[in-house]
Image (cartoon, helix red, strand yellow):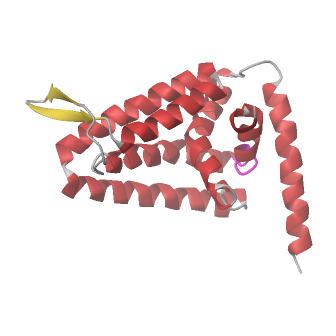
Amino acid sequence: MGFLDLEKNFAFYAAYHSNPINIAIHMIFVWPIFYTALLLFYFIPTPFNLPCIHFPLFGTHFVLIFNFGFLFTLIFAVSYVCFDYKAGSLAALLCLFCWIASSVVASLLGFQLAWKVVLVVQLISWTAQFIGHGLFEGRAPALLDNIFQAFLMAPFFVLFEALQIVFGYEPYPGFHVRVTSMVDVEVEEWRNKKATLLP
């Protein structure tokens, strides 16, 4: 369990995202952050030569490079499948789609235009999420407490939340009840700690 404990990881992230508006903001803007990060990774050279795949597209071609973007995608995809093979497999497919799609866009745009697109999307997405935390959640983002766990869980969390809201998905019976009780305890501890720090 430990690192791959779905309940603990989900409860950790959910404790920072209990407000419906903040959750909706994250559902809109988390995956664009992941996607544009892969778009930027496309242009970072690797210290070793890995194979490339060339595909014809729109009268030109794009190159699928097994680079840092692929490694980044692989880490996320494997982690998600280990968390929960059903929702995790869907998340892994989305990660793979983002890697392929970002490679296509990177090939078509070139670095000079791609980095500007990345900058704009990242700025808008991060600003929206900080507004969500500041105005609606009233709590700092999870990344300030555990940056690695927050970055890893964010794309999976919003997809998992969407599956839960739309389809009532649970990886096993009682998951939602157990996680909700864990979140309630975590939020209560945070409120008590916050109250003791107030003058």
Q: Is residue 140 above or below residue 78?
A: below
* Farthest residue, direction left: 59
Left or right of residue 156, residue 136 in this image: right
Residue at 55 percent of width and 40 percent of height: 155
Q: In this rendering, is residue 135 above or below 63?
A: below
Q: Position of residue 126 (x, y in %)?
A: 50, 58
Q: Which residues are magenta?
A: 14-19
Q: Nearer the viewer, residue 44 or 59?
A: 44
Locate residue 191 relative to residue 128 in the image: left or right: right
Spot occupied by residue 185 in the image (x, y as percentages of width and height): 89, 47
Taking the magenta stretch, the answer to whether it contains residue 8 is no
Q: Residue at x 54, y 29 (%)?
A: 78
In the current view of this chain or complex, which residue is farthest to the front?
48
Horizontal side of 71 relative to 79 (left or right) equals left
- Looking at this view, is 34 or 47 the one in front? 47
Q: Does the magenta run of residues contain 16?
A: yes
